[in-house]
Amino acid sequence: MYEDFPQPKFYMRSSDWRLIHRASFSLAMVSLLALTIVISYTALTLNNRRQNLKVLGTTTTDSHSTTPKVDSK
């Protein structure tokens, strides 16, 4: 039944393959750049939050401790 209709043959030119490779490479580089920016922003935000807690005199481990702090003078 399908033999009556010849299937069209589609061949891509080498310039088309180069365009696809260039586009996929560009997309990969943009994704990598975005991931780097997100990771850097997250690390800086967490670091700033940790430093702000140190300024206030508490850290994340001190807030859960049950023993009172004794100043050694």
Image (spheres, helix red, strand yellow):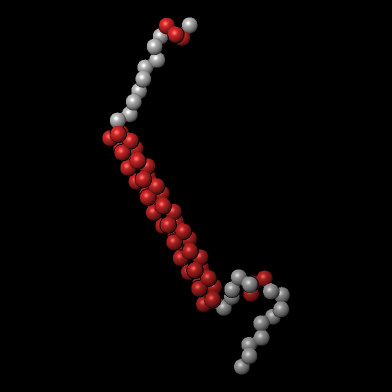
- Residue at the (48%, 64%) spot, across then down: 43
Q: Check the image and name the residue furthest to the right.
A: 66
Instruction: Give the farthest residue toward the bottom.
Output: 73
Q: Is 24 situated above or below 2?
A: below
Q: How many marks?
A: 0
In this rendering, position of residue 67 left or right of residue 17: right
**Above or below, comparing residue 35 to residue 5 in the picture:** below
Place of residue 72 in the rendered image (x, y in percent of width and height, measured from the top left): 63, 90
Q: Residue at x 37, y 50 (%)?
A: 29
Residue 70, x across and y down, in percent: 66, 86
Q: Which of these two is toward me, 41 or 33?
A: 33
From the viewer's perspective, is residue 69 above or below residue 7? below
Q: Position of residue 20 (x, y in %)?
A: 34, 37
**In the displayed structure image, the side of residue 23 where residue 70 appears, left or right:** right
Q: Quadrant of the C terminus?
A: bottom right
- Viewer-nearest residue: 45 or 6: 6
Viewer-side residue, 7 vs 25 = 7
Q: Name the residue at 42% across, 6% down.
A: 4
Residue 6, image x, y percentages: 39, 11
Q: Residue at x 59, y 75 (%)?
A: 58
